[in-house]
Amino acid sequence: MSADFFYTVEVIINGLMTGVMYSLVALGFVLIFKASGVFNYAQGVMALFAAMTLVGIQTGQVPFAHLINTIFGTHLHKFGWEVPTLLAILLALGVMILFAFIVERYILKHLVNQDPIILFMATIGLAYFMEGFGDLMWGSEIKNLDVGLPQGGNIWLENATSDWADGFYGFYLDNLDMWATAIAVVLVASLIVFSNYTKTGRALRAVADDNQAALSVGISLRTIWVIVWSLAGFVALVAGIMWGAKSGVQFSLSLIALKALPVLMLGGFTSIPGAIVGGMIIGVGEKLFEFAVGPYIGGATENWFAYVLALLFLVFRPQGLFGEKIIERV
Amino acid sequence: MNATAESYVTEDGRTIGAPVMEVKNITLKFGGVTAISNISFDIREGEIRAIIGPNGAGKSSMLNVINGFYHPQEGEIWFHGEKRKPMKPYQIAQQGIARTFQNIALFKGMSTLDNIMTGRFTHMKTNMLKQAIWKGPAEREESLNRDIVEHVIDFLEIQAIRKTPVGRLPYGLQKRVELGRALAAQPKLLLLDEPMAGMNVEEKEDMSRFILDVNDEFGTTIALIEHDMGVVMDISDRVVVLDYGKKIGDGTPDEVRNNQDVIDAYLGVAHD
Amino acid sequence: MFYRESGDFKTTYAKDTQTFPIKLDRMGYYVILAVALILVPIMLMKDVGGGANYWTNAIFLPFLIWAVASIGLNILVGYCGQLSLGSGGFMAVGAYASYKLMTWDVPFIGELNFVVVVILSGVITAGVGILFGLPSLRIKGFYLAVATLAAQFFLVWLFNKVPWFYNYSASGQISVPTRSVLGFQVTGATAAPEAKYLLCLVILIVVALVARNLTRGRIGRSWMAIRDMDIAAEIIGVAPLKTKLSAFGVSSFFIGVAGALFFAVYLGAAEVGEAFGIQKSFLLLFMVIIGGLGSIFGSIVGAAFMVLMPVLLKNIMVGHLNWATDIAAHFEFVIVGALIILFLILEPHGLAQLWRLLKDKLRLWPFPH
């Protein structure tokens, strides 16, 4: 087998792993959409915010330091301590849960029974708010996120496979990507277990099916929303850690998260396996397209490939890969 | 029932003409479920034709076939003596078939006047350029059609709510506005899906009066679905009875009332 | 007491459907027109207070141009109910179309008139808009919104990567040649502020009138019918695809005109990712939400609000409090986001509805019972 073949395989594997990262963000969307019918545009910014908070706590940054210094003329920057990674992650998770409470209390509660499109636009507003708020709180510079995961290419794998073909230097796979894949698999498995085998999980699914009926059997909609947004916050934190460790905590993270949207259009908005498979298809598709066609048309096709693919796909199969065909009743 | 295609005059002096619409051997399936099987009937010009039957009999499905939301697997529909090709609902509307819905389907963001004005859509022709300029043809057309709409508003006695957003109106009035929208289209055939569902006696009387008046004054052909037997027997010329997707009776109210199959269906005799 | 409709009897249907049925409104409208068309240009020309350039570039031009775009988006989102996040991309189409048209030596004609260029740019954008509107028949709601993101990212990428669009310039930027309308230079750095201002103002007035005319008649009602209930729209004879595409076309036409003006009159030189990125799509959407969905007047107010607010914030925070510009920018995000949520919760019909409510109160004042 030729080197070209192995390079293509390498592209596919890398695409799969990128796809897992997309799926990770998409999962957050699916969770909230299933339980509340809200299409949460802010999921990407939530990941960014979670990552920023984690870095801030870890490095002992003073929240709103820049703002306080500006107003009071002080020179605050750091508390001077470092918080251990695990504790910092738990604290960041706490912040995300607090955030879920605030969202429920001040936004969702007031928008019950509104059109989905209004809720969607409200989450765009929420995304803007969080973006500004996060920058005010932790500063807008690019931050390094280090939670102790191995970085860089996997030398062992590269060496082991380098003599598979002439002119082939071995598979170059990023350690972090492999970790992310493993973590995503664990996360998805535990989410499925949670929603199928726990009481809360059943309540979640009941609300997703019909929130009126769920209310009538004594499930508190508001509690469910807080739980779901907290879960989504947790998923955002995990996604934020992965993306942040890979390319630094910066604004572009929230744009990468936008890629989750075409993923969902492929996989369907309500299906967890759909989000995973959709992510893989987008990840592999855009890497292969860039590899095979990109050089001829100027490159950087990853910017739009996912969206155009999803668009074309939707025109021919509007219900997504796993959605059921909807019979419109008149 | 008069079996020939000739026209005849009813007891109250209205002329009933030849069939406007003929539904022939319609069968409609959803996946494995047969909603309508092999149903045929006709609707004559100028008559009030009722379609009745227990819940799930296929009445609404039948209306949806007639105005193009569902496409039957078998059968033909003839309109004005021509076999109809498969069409989209809006093309069927352009042919002059208007309808109302069982659950009110008004445009919630618009006023009563605008809702009824939308009924004139198929009669308005000025192009986008003329609309953009407004002064001249577009404004003239708007005023002409407004005149027709004002007649409908007078007829339905809803002058006072002309500029009220329909979302704020009570249920009975919303039903009336929806009828107004269908009337504004000056349809050749008017389909009413349970026009009196959920109304109190007074509102039902009003609605019956409007339906009879529409038929009488404008000679509009009407096909309606209704559950209130008293109303159906009072206002319709002929009745078709469906049960489990099959036709079990067809004729004048008296004939249907005495049909053994119909009595069984309504009183609940076990099916074989 | 003074602001009322009683006693002002309409004798024709045409008078009943006019834009400002109340006399006081009509007078107010003429006063505003007179100020905008006569007083402001004179002040700009005389450079009263020495800020003509600042006022034109920081406030008037962005406001007028965004108002045109905002009317365009409101037709699609507010009137026809089709959410679009691709407006930035469509503005880019308008901008690049105008650039290619201005730098094109047309056989037998030579240089195209600038107004013709702007209109043609709108037409080209309408074509692109209709193309990306095609999926709207099959896709609804936020699925469509995501689909329009494809337009945004693809178009920006296209103008960035295909050198033909920027005439192979080394920087990848496009910069506007000088053009005049009726003998007054309107593009380029040396154009007089009042000339730029008047051109954009006249275009805004025309666009607003056309939009108002389209939305009050047959076509506008068919858009709203599709928005409110597409099934019911079909049974009154509205063809869904044709109607949605007409909304995409008209909307993109206005957005394309705005894109051409934004590049040629306001920016002068542009790089596509910077000038027409996804942030612009959101900015435009916010103008429409804050101003009021389904209101031409609201679109203009929304544009004014979103243009003025950052200027004001910057003046207060940077100018008076001496804060760093980035803090002001972050605050802008926080405030805009909070306002969007607040408006959607309290008044989904935006500033236009607040204005209507105020007028309803005024009608009864000072005897509210």
Image (cartoon, coloured by chain):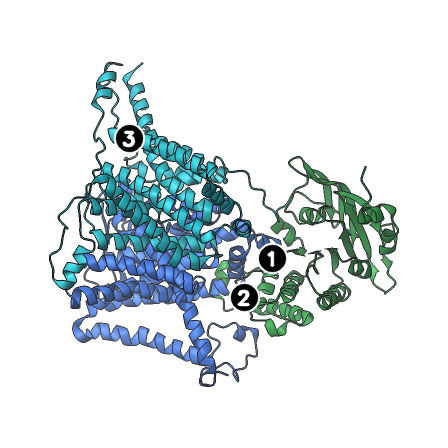
Q: Which chain is green?
A: B
Q: Nearer the viewer, residue B269 or C265?
A: B269
Q: Which residue does the numbered mark 1 point to in the structure image?
A: B105
Which amino acid is tagged 3?
Answer: Trp
Mark 3 lies on a secondary structure that is helix
Chain C appears in which tint? Answer: blue
Find residue A74 and report its horizontal and vertical position in percent: 11, 60
Discs 2 and 3 carry the same chain letter = no
**Which chain contains the residue that carries disc 1?**
B
**Which chain contains the residue that carries disc 3?**
A
Label 2 environment density (alpha carbons within 10 Å; few <14, some 14–19, many ≥20): some
Label 1 environment density (alpha carbons within 10 Å; few <14, some 14–19, many ≥20): some
Mark 2 lies on a secondary structure that is helix
Residue C120 visible in the displayed image = no
In the visual, does B196 lie left or right of C333? right
Q: Is residue A240 above or below residue B124?
A: above
Find residue A106 and report its horizontal and vertical position in percent: 38, 59
Mark 1–mark 3 distance (CA, rounded to whole Å): 53 Å
Q: Is residue C210 above or below residue C142?
A: below
Q: Is residue A12 above or below residue A160?
A: below
**Which chain contains the residue that carries disc 2?**
B
Q: Which residue does the numbered mark 2 point to in the structure image?
A: B137
Marks 2 and 1, the one that precedes in the sequence: 1
Which amino acid is tagged 1?
Answer: Ala
Q: Which mark is residue A179?
A: 3
Discs 1 and 3 carry the same chain letter = no
In the visual, does B178 lie left or right of C283? right
